[in-house]
Image (spheres, rainbow, N blue to C red):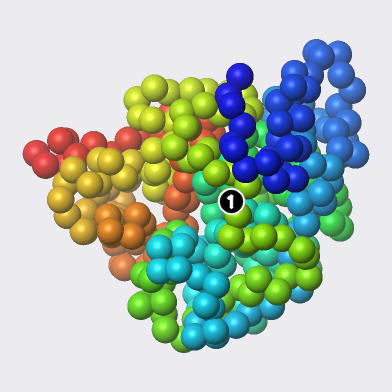
């Protein structure tokens, strides 16, 4: 059993509790945290309670923002998720997302859901329109492959963040459109987008946003929850940029990108040209198509990408140098 982080916050204590009760009997009814898992696209036995009940980790439905110059609570090296839509730039600090995981927002006139899973290190922004309606998402308290399962409040369908798909409920099988999202430092984001707005710590919830409830987790090799596939090729928490291009998956481990010694790496995925821009100093990687348009990649831990995509291709520096 992996030792939990040292910061014994409410979230951490809930995780610890879950560790001791995460093995589900095979005959368990497909109902967890109040969600009916009948007909789930993933095995119900592989959906685990993370500890908190439904909405025990509160999503932010009425987010408040401040100008970059007013974000004194951020240090240069603090990590943020950065989104640009309709000419508007917004930064979502990881220190806040660790405690809320979902921000239901509107950017550039479009409804979006900005999501972060601390256990997988994955940030994904979604177009939050389902049909012609805006969807509001909450934190289900459930995990699949250690990744957060969102739920939309209208239909109670469960959505896998990394799969980008509803895995249970009335919308089972439908997919959400992911949006290009930067995962970088506050220093780098502010330099590129000085006009950015920043998610405020004035969330309406009492949290110590300078305290990391998952302290130490990103460097440990252990996982809190089971996953369906494992690979020892890289450290489980090695950061990778994962791409889906024409139904083909490819991972770009940061360790491999660093070995190239380049800031820009040209590659092909299923015959299509992609450009990877790697910023070693700020620990970030972004992907663009052959026309220079940003792609909606996912930055996260190697174990998480592999668990969902065991057939993934892998970028290797030594092969790229040939």
For mark 1, give the secondary structure.
Answer: loop
Query: In the orientation shown, which residue stands out farthest toward the top?
Result: 26
Which picture quadrant has residue 75?
Answer: bottom left
Residue depicted at 33% across the width and 41% down the height: 253
Residue 136 location, x and y as percent? 78, 63
Taking 6 as reference, is 102 left or right? Answer: right
Residue depicted at 58% across the width and 60% down the height: 210
Which picture quadrant has residue 288?
Answer: bottom left
Q: The N terminus appears in which quarter of the rendering?
A: top right
Vertical side of 124 occupied by 200: above or below: below
Visible in this render: residue 128? Answer: no
Taking 123 as reference, is 138 left or right? Answer: right
Vertical side of 108 occupied by 153: above or below: above
Label 1 sits on residue: 212
Residue 87 location, x and y as percent? 50, 84
Between 297 and 51, the one nearer to me in the picture = 51
Residue depicted at 48% across the width and 23% down the height: 230
Residue depicted at 86% across the width and 13% down the height: 27
């Amino acid at each position: 059993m992996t030792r939990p982080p040292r910061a014994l916050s409410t979230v951490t204590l809930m995780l610890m509790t879950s560790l001791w009760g995460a093995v589900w009997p095979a005959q368990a009814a497909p109902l967890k945290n109040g969600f009916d898992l009948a007909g789930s696209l993933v095995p119900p036995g592989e959906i685990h309670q993370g500890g908190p009940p439904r909405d025990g980790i509160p999503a932010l439905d009425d987010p408040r923002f401040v100008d970059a110059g007013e974000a004194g609570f951020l240090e240069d090296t603090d990590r943020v998720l950065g989104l640009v839509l309709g000419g508007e730039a917004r930064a979502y600090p990881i220190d806040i997302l660790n405690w809320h995981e979902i921000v239901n927002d509107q950017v550039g006139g479009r409804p979006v859901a900005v999501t972060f899973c601390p256990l997988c290190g994955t940030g994904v922004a979604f177009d939050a329109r389902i049909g012609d309606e805006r969807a509001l998402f909450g934190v289900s308290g459930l995990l699949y492959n250690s990744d957060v399962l969102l739920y939309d409040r209208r239909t109670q369908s469960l959505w896998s963040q990394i799969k980008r798909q509803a895995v249970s409920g009335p919308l089972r099988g439908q997919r959400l459109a992911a949006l290009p999202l930067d995962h970088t430092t506050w220093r780098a984001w502010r330099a590129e987008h000085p006009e950015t707005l920043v998610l405020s710590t004035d969330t309406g919830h009492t949290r110590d946003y300078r305290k990391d409830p998952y302290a130490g987790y990103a460097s440990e090799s252990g996982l809190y929850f089971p996953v369906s596939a494992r690979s020892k090729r890289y450290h489980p928490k090695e950061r990778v940029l994962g791409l889906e291009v024409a139904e083909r998956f490819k991972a770009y481990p940061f360790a491999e990108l660093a070995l190239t010694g380049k800031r820009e790496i040209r590659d092909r995925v299923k015959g299509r040209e992609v450009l990877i821009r790697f910023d070693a100093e700020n620990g970030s990687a972004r992907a663009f198509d052959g026309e220079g348009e940003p792609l909606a990649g996912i930055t996260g831990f190697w174990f998480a990408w592999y668990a969902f995509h065991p057939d993934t291709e892998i970028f290797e520096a030594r092969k790229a140098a040939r």
